[in-house]
Image (spheres, helix red, strand yellow):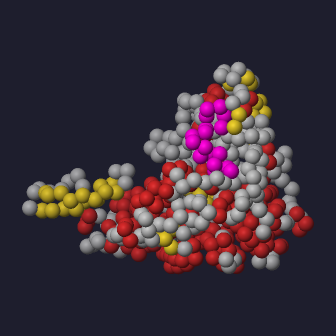
Amino acid sequence: MIIACTVTLIGGISQSCTNLNKKVYAVVPVGNFYQTPDQIAAGVAPAYTALQNLPDGNVMQMNEITSDEMVVPTRGNDWYDGGQWQGLWLHKFKPDVFVDGGWTDLTKGIGEVNFILNILNGLPNKPSNIANIVAELKVVRAYSIYQMMDMFGNIPLVTDFNTDPSKVTQSDRATVYAFLENELTTNIPLLSTTVDKTTYGRATQYFGYMLLAKLYMNAQVYTGTPQWAKAIAALNQVINSGKYILQPNYFDNFSITNDGSSENIFVVPFDKVHIGGMNWEMQTLHYSNNLTYGLTGQPWNGFCATADVYNKYDASDARRAQFLVGQQYEADGKTPLQDPQANLPVIFDPNITSLSDASGLFRMAGARNIKYHPEAGTAGNQSNDGVVFRLADAYLMRAEASMRNGDAASALADVNKIRERAGVADWTAGDLTLPHLLDERSRELMWEGWRRQDLIRFEVADGVTYFTGARTPAKTADGDTHTFVFPIPAPEILANPNLHQNPGY
């Protein structure tokens, strides 16, 4: 009798042990796996599959709707859902199932990597490049750990698949910060510096340096001590590599064919046939916009932006075209679009003065965002790849770090690279202020998932209530800064009594 443990690679990794009395043809025994480039790519694939919920899912929504960039009004009976969307905007966070969705999406990614590493460690015949494979997996895992620490503060730091769940406790932010810094600086040098189709959607050194830069940019939030010079050094590794250039057309970074972007450093690939989950078109567009873009289903009329956001853009700013405002039309560009239920024309008004309204006009409230351009013939599951890191963010982070580190000239040069691409006037030295820089980050990185973090970082560094302050519609100032982190989800505390709730919840 032969007992073989096998790895099955269909939509993820699973382990099984089977009694076999004849040769194995349909599966690859674990001991013989990870020996070829194709096997290695298949073996690490679940670590990346676990990221598919992040560019458009709970994590993105929690990071954007809590900021000034995105609001989800309740239109009649639509988009109330127990008050969860309003709660994000108002900073009335509850440790409920919705918040647990973000926690679960991140821990899934961490768990997948821990499982794969456990398999690798047990291989009797390890591949010759085992150190590089392990480094890649650890850096991918670091991204999920980083997001989790940023969002929830004190978190379980679990890096071993065989950890006893009953003994899992929380680590404070300073401890997680130190772990991530060591994990990244140790493993980044072992990652590939190749930037081509073979590394598309994979963690290269430049993915690692962007993540390290994010860690350093927000060090003051996490540890109380800023690390601007370290952030600049990490960003220089990306910018000075010469591997990336600003895409001449801003929107090419987010198009249906954005796999050709020269600017995107790391994306999560999507495809309307094979890889679903990219649903921006459905979440933001009005129900009738299927007639505008040739969609096969009605959008959901949800996510939008306020006048405060829309008005940050000059009329000449090319990036302003990501928003739909005013009268909308059918595909011919001439026939005015109608809302048949409200018996009104679809005219998007960015002026939102309340969070809930049952009137017909309120169905059109808010500027809609088509940065990820809708794809004809789909009803969600677009083919636009989800952007995580791109060169423009590297320039803007370096500009901020340089400015805070006393080098205004370098900061100005970096910002103006971004503004020139957008078709707006260069800044002079007098234009370079921290509030202006925060606005520029909003214009450039709108709905890319960094705004909550940006507002908190600027508030901590500058003492201005960018995140906790009041905003229209209806949000009053937070009573304190406990809202800088989300509550630990109640289901997680119920499952593990060792976890303790964050202060203020």
Q: Residue at x 69, y 37 (%)?
A: 356
Q: Position of residue 38 (x, y in %)?
A: 37, 59
Q: Which residues are magenta?
A: 74-90
Q: Is residue 366 left or right of residue 110?
A: right
Q: Is residue 171 above or below residue 336?
A: below
Q: Is residue 309 left or right of residue 50?
A: right
Q: Which image quadrant for residue 428?
A: bottom right
The answer to whether residue 317 is seen in the rendering is no
- Quadrant assignment for the C terminus: bottom right
Q: Is residue 87 magenta?
A: yes
Q: Is residue 176 above or below residue 283?
A: below
Q: Which image quadrant for residue 173?
A: bottom right
Q: Report the number of discs.
A: 0
- Which residue is nearer to you in this view: 397 or 250? 397
Q: Residue at x 78, y 40 (%)?
A: 353
The answer to whether residue 347 is seen in the rendering is yes
Q: Residue at x 65, y 45 (%)?
A: 86
Q: Is residue 282 magenta?
A: no
- Which residue is nearer to you in this view: 342 or 294? 342
- Which residue is nearer to you in this view: 503 or 175? 503
Q: Position of residue 161 (x, y in %)?
A: 36, 68
Q: Residue at x 58, y 30 (%)?
A: 298
- Which residue is nearer to you in this view: 239 or 70? 70
- Quadrant assignment for the N terminus: bottom left
Q: Position of residue 187 (x, y in %)?
A: 49, 75
Q: Position of residue 152 (x, y in %)?
A: 56, 63
Q: Is residue 13 above or below residue 162?
A: above
Q: Is residue 400 left or right of residue 297?
A: right
